[in-house]
Amino acid sequence: NGSVATIFQAQIEAGGPVTITDRRMTRYFMTVAEAVDLVIMSAADAEQRRGRDDYAIYMLDMGKPVPILEVAETMIRMAGKSPYTDIPIRFTGIRPGEKLHEMLHGENEEVVKLDIAKIFGLRSDVVEWRRIEAALPVLVAAMLDRDKAAALAILAGLNLAEEHAGAPAQAVPKTAGQIG
């Protein structure tokens, strides 16, 4: 769908309306420079650790979530217009599966403080790769046969189906999370 800034900019240039899902909606934002720093610093840290820690996901300290309505109003003002008067704002309603507020990590994940400013590690209970690799041929066969029950049974054996269905997953051994 594109970034919210790009979409809002096009809507403002067209004279509106600027469309927002819900007035309560918030999102986290990062700059291109922050994204580049995250990739470079994470790669350097992973190379230095060489698998010594059991996290393989890095997360930027995103600060506080930003209300999307404020983003829209600010962009309209920056274009020299008045929100609601010159450029209408229309609320479209939440679509299926859409969230009002982003979650940067799951309840079963632990944020790990690193020696890198504004970057954290994310430790998660994951299924060991060798178990997934062993189950893949059987899972693919079940999927090709369109056997949903068999596919779900295979995933349940890996403790993935419970997570997918929203039920609490059983304890899974922690791993380094690196493959290969």
Image (cartoon, rainbow, N blue to C red):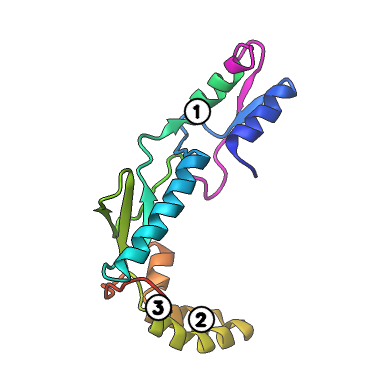
Q: Verify whether residue 128 appears in magenta.
A: no
In contact (CB < 8 Å): disc 3 and disc 2? no
Earlier-in-chain disc, 3 versus 2? 2
Amino acid on which disc 3 is placed: Ala
Q: Which is the main secondary structure of the residues drawn in magenta?
A: loop
Q: Residue at x 32, y 70 (%)?
A: 50
User: Residue 64 appears at what percent x and percent y?
Assistant: 36, 34
**Rendered position, 126 above or below 76:** below
Is residue 92 visible in this depiction of the protein?
no
Q: Residue at x 39, y 53 (%)?
A: 41
- Residue 134 location, quadrant: bottom left
User: Residue 15 appears at what percent x and percent y?
Assistant: 73, 20
In contact (CB < 8 Å): disc 2 and disc 1? no
Most foreground residue, 161 or 174: 174
What SS does tag 2 mark? helix
Most foreground residue, 168 or 107: 107
Report the residue marked by disc 3: 156
Report the residue marked by disc 2: 151
**Rendered position, 95 above or below 51:** above
Q: Which residues are magenta?
A: 77-99
Report the residue marked by disc 1: 23
Q: Label 1 neighbourhood size at 10 Å, few (<14), some (14-19), many (20+)?
A: some
Earlier-in-chain disc, 2 versus 1? 1
Image side of residue 3 versus residue 37, left or right:
right
